[in-house]
Image (cartoon, rainbow, N blue to C red):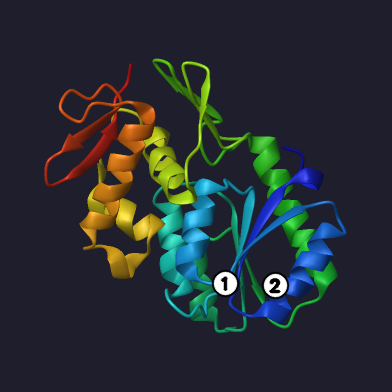
Amino acid sequence: MTPDHARILIVDDELPIRRFLRISLRSQGYEVLEAETGGQGLLMAVSDQPDLVLLDLGLPDIEGQEVLQAIREQSRIPVIVVSVRDSESEKVACLDAGANDYITKPFGIQELLARVRAVLRQRSSTGESSAPRRLQAGELIIDFDMRKVTLAGRLIRLTPREYAVLAMLAEHPGRVITQTQLLKDIWGPVHQRDTHYLRIIISKLRYKLGDDPEQPTLIQTEAGVGYRLLEV
């Protein structure tokens, strides 16, 4: 990734703002992704692996600071908060929670573009990456840049949520990821108790990956706790 060809995720519920940012960023050669809710933004932050997130705080489903905290719990993706809230305490809270920068609406587009370039340059120069770019577990290969999963050379077609769950497990191979963390980060905080959502996705993943739940070689269940991707 070079700064001029970065993928930027906009998380904002206001369509005019998203449109304005989309046009401005694309004019500079950036690839643009859009989410209008916090839950959708979290899902895309995992499944689409953006190089930078522009995050509004006043989202309809999840408070923006909660979205920021959820991203920071699993990733070092740079986040620039773009919000109408201009109090010093709000800015300090976001920066302390891991935001890389904070811009107050309304803003000049040249200022925003300059801050975007600065954050991307810093990330590029330090070699930071939001996730391993490629992981192999036996015959399973996950290419994070291409969002492609293959098994024994065969392409495995996954839905966005199936990929998001697998990617979260793959970011920490051998480590148990709790049901609560998976549900909160992929479905949103209001679904932390909806474990049946996760059981369905795990079942579908095992079927597509040919992983026997009785004697798993890829995805192991820790009863009542969560799941881990086995290291091979």
Residue drawn at the location 83% of the way across and 66% of the way down: 24
The picture quadrant where one finds residue 189 is bottom left
Any mark on residue 150, and which? none
Of 135 and 55, which appears nearest the observer? 135
Residue receiving disc 1 = 36
**Residue occupying image coordinates x 64% and y 80%:** 14
Work out whether residue 39 can be spotted: yes
Look at mark 2 in the image and give the residue it sits on: 18
Question: From where the camera sits, is residue 176 visible?
Answer: no
* Residue 77 image offset from top left, x and y in percent: 56, 49
In the figure, 42 relative to 75: above or below? below
The image shows residue 63 at horizontal and vertical percentages of 43, 75
The amino acid type, in three-letter code, at marker 1 is Glu
Which element is circle 1 on? Answer: loop
Q: How many marks?
A: 2
The C terminus, quarter of image: top left
Amino acid, disc 2: Arg
Picture quarter containing residue 99? bottom right
Q: Position of residue 69 (x, y in %)?
A: 42, 61
User: What element does badge 2 sit on?
Assistant: helix
Q: Earlier in the sequence, mark 2 or mark 1?
A: 2
Image location of residue 222, percent across then percent down: 16, 38
Q: Are marks 2 and 1 in contact (CB under 8 Å)?
A: yes
Taking 147 as reference, is 30 left or right? Answer: right
Label 1: few (<14), some or many (≥20) within 10 Å? some
What is the C-alpha distance between the residues marked 2 and 1?
9 Å
Q: Quadrant of residue 211?
A: top left
